[in-house]
Structure formats: structure tokens, C-alpha cells
Amino acid sequence: MTESWRGLVLRFHFYAGVLVGPFVLIAALTGVLYAATPQLESWVYSDQLRVPVSTSSVPLADQVEAAVATRPGDELVAVRPAPEPGATTRVLFASDGDARPTVFVNPADGTVVGDLMTYGTSGVLPLRTTIDQIHRNLLLGEPGRLYSELAASWLWVVALGGVFLWFSRRRTQRTKPATKRHAVLGLWVLVGALFLSATGLTWSAYAGENVSDLRKALDWTTPSLGAGDGHAGHGSGTTAPASPDDVDAVLATARSAGIDGDKVEISLPASADAPWTVTEVGRGWPSQVDAVAVMGGDVVDQVRFADYPLAAKLTRWGIDAHMGILFGWPNQLLLLAIGLGLVTLVVLGYRVWWLRRPTRGFGRPVPRGQWRKVPRGQLIAVLVVAVGVGWFVPLFGLSLLAFLLVDAALSTRRKQVPEPV
């Protein structure tokens, strides 16, 4: 069975690697750059992020008031108290997009030390946001996401194909040094490549939507407060509008309810009869993502990470590890190693192709017609699986179909003519 499949897998691995290599290369290089951004941010934005360590601090409400005074026309939406001595408090304001205007306040004396745009739950700053967008879509917006989805869609296929080829290789078969280096390195980065491919697809435009639908169907979604938006109303009657002056009391109530993470976000109510929400936003290990809803001095709803479905926990851990923040700097170093390994793999792969180019007398690297060597039943079974995977991961399915059609067209036109690589 192994020998009957080897030629087809080799041909598929060779040409698929040549075609998707540029996408994997860009994704790996930008991913390596992204993995190093926490330290870059700490250096570039040190004036906004760090202040002299002090043993005293002013009330959180006074810090919020100082921030609001700098943006009198903006809507206050959340506060992130300083997570440690020497760090600043973040006061966040409403915005039309995902990035929110944020004022940084010295908790020791309530002075404003700067303002920046912050992005998402992680609260990343402009530098990291830009690198993230380059990695995600090359700064081309929604159409640009196709490149990263294509890379993630094919990475696991090419990687597993390479493993098959390594273990199916004849012991007596001589292997050129470049090919051997490519294969050995591929084995070292295999697990990381599969992990990055799987977690990357959860963010993708088309496969990611199918992943979300599957999680909903299997009830694997992440629990949320109230009706699902974190601001569902509780109780009855009319409640006075929330005041920033209440932020200290709200935080104290949340702390007494077990919200003990260093990094928390206190979100103001969306309406007069909705609760405050206090959410742990630390993404390191152990995961701290508990959340409570507070109204009238009482906790009226809560979500605990311990109660998440296993699939939701795995999703949380997978995303945080993909971003390099789950285990701190060891996580970053691992991502750097995997990313640089993928870059080297792509370069070595193209070197193998160059060494086997027709001008060196090798002709086609792998002749056509390899599928004829595969038992018909096995081939049909694999095609059925490919159709299913192609439906769930649409860019893989469409690009695979395009590859097969082009290959068939070339075969029809050049039956009697040696094919250039």
C-alpha cells in the first residue's frame, strides 16, 4: 500500500509545496515578527506603559476622572486598573471600530501620561496591531485574509505528506543532502506546523465560519454573561445611570466574588438597567478569564473558566498559544523556532525543486499518471475524504480543484512533449 501511494503523494507534495510556499513563507516571517512584539511594545511605548513604582495610589474613580477630563466629548466604556506596581491604568473610550481610544494614567497620583489606540481583549497597542494585520491580511483588508487562510489550509496537508514520504522511503534509496535536510527539519517542526495550521483556520474567513458553526451545533461555544453580550438587564424597575464614581465599589464586589486576576477590565453598563461587568483579561497560564456582572452592589451573574466546555477551553488555550502569550517568553521562543523552521523548510524546498529542474536533466520531478498505481478503492476513499475536507475548508477545496484541472489540462496538451517544471 505504501509503495503504491508514494509516487502520487510525492508528486502532490512537490507541486503543492511549490505553489503554496510563498504564502507559508510570508505567514511564517510575519508570525515570527509578531511573536517578538510584546518586548518591542514595552520598549516603544514605555512612557505610556510604565511609571515609577509607588507604594501609594489614588482611588480608581479619580484616575478615571482625570482621563475623562482629557476627552470630554467621548463616551467612557471601560477601565483596566494597573495590574502591578509601576504599570499604568488604562481608561478606554467608545469607538466605531475594534480599536478603542485609551488614556494611560499614573495610579500613584492620577496624572495622565499619554493616550493610544488599543485593540481587542488583549489590549495590544498600535505597533503590535499593525504587525498583526500584516500577518493576518497584508494590510489589504478582508481580501487579504485569503493569503493567510490559503497558507493555513495547505500547511497541514503538505506537512503530513512530507511525513508519509519520509517513512515510506526505501532504505536503499539514496537521498540528496538538500532533500534530507528538508525532510529532517520537517519532522522537527511537524507538530508546531499542524498546531499553527489548525488554530490559524479558526480565525480564517471561510473555514473559520464553518468551525464556529460546528462549535455552536455541538454546544462547544464559550459561555457568556446574561443574554450573551455581557450587558443583559437583571432585576426590575428603573436604575439610576451608572457613574464612574462607582468603579471602586464595583471592583471590590468583583474581587470578593473571586475575580482575583491581576489584569481585569471593568465595563460600564450599556444602559441604566444593565449591570457592570468585570472580566479577567489575563491570557497567561493558568488561564484567568472569569467574569461577573455586578448591579446594586451584588453579583447577579457569573461565568467561570472552570465551567467552560472542554472544547471551549482548548480553543482558548490554542488561540493564546498561537499568539505567544499563554506561557509567556517560553511560548514566544517556541513560536520563533517554529516560524524560522518553516521559513527554512520553504527555502530548502525550493532548493530541492531547483536541483531537480529539467535543465539539469531530471525531466519532470515526478511523472504524471501516479494515481493509476493506487488501488481503485483506496483512491475513491481518499477522494471522498478530500471532498469533505474541501467543503469544510473551502480555500483548500477550491485550490485543490484548480490544481487538478490545470494538471489535467497540461497532461492533455503535452502528452508527447517533455513538461518543464
Image (cartoon, grey):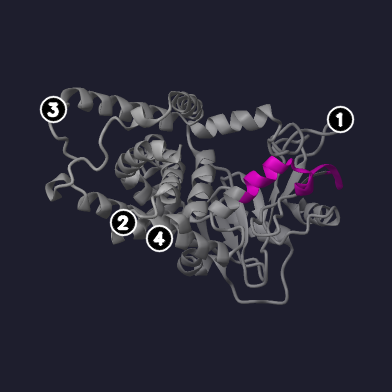
Q: Nearer the viewer, mark 1 or mark 4?
A: 4
In front of the other: 371 or 402: 371
Crowd class of label 4 (few under 14; some 14 to 19; many from 20; radius 10 Å): some
Secondary structure of the residue carrying numbered label 2: loop
> Which amino acid is tagged 3?
Gln
Residue beneath the point at 72% across and 35% down = 271
Residue tagged 4: 340
Q: Estimate the x, y position of residue 38 in percent, counting from the top left.
A: 51, 63
Q: Nearer the viewer, mark 1 or mark 3?
A: 3
Q: Nearer the viewer, mark 1 or mark 2?
A: 2
Marks 1/3: CA distance?
82 Å
Marks 2/3: CA distance?
30 Å
> Which amino acid is tagged 1?
Ser
Is residue 149 rendered magenta in the image? no
> Which amino acid is tagged 4?
Leu
The C terminus lies in quadrant: top left
Residue tagged 1: 236
Residue 219, compared with residue 333, is above or below; it is: above
Q: Estimate the x, y position of residue 330 in percent, counting from the top left.
A: 56, 66
- Residue 141 appears in the figure: no
Magenta-drawn segment = 295-317
The disc, 4 or 3, on the residue closer to the chain's N-terminal end is: 4
The disc, 1 or 2, on the residue closer to the chain's N-terminal end is: 2
Crowd class of label 2 (few under 14; some 14 to 19; many from 20; radius 10 Å): few
Residue tagged 3: 416
The disc, 1 or 3, on the residue closer to the chain's N-terminal end is: 1
Residue 174: mark = 2
The disc, 4 or 2, on the residue closer to the chain's N-terminal end is: 2
> Which amino acid is tagged 2?
Arg
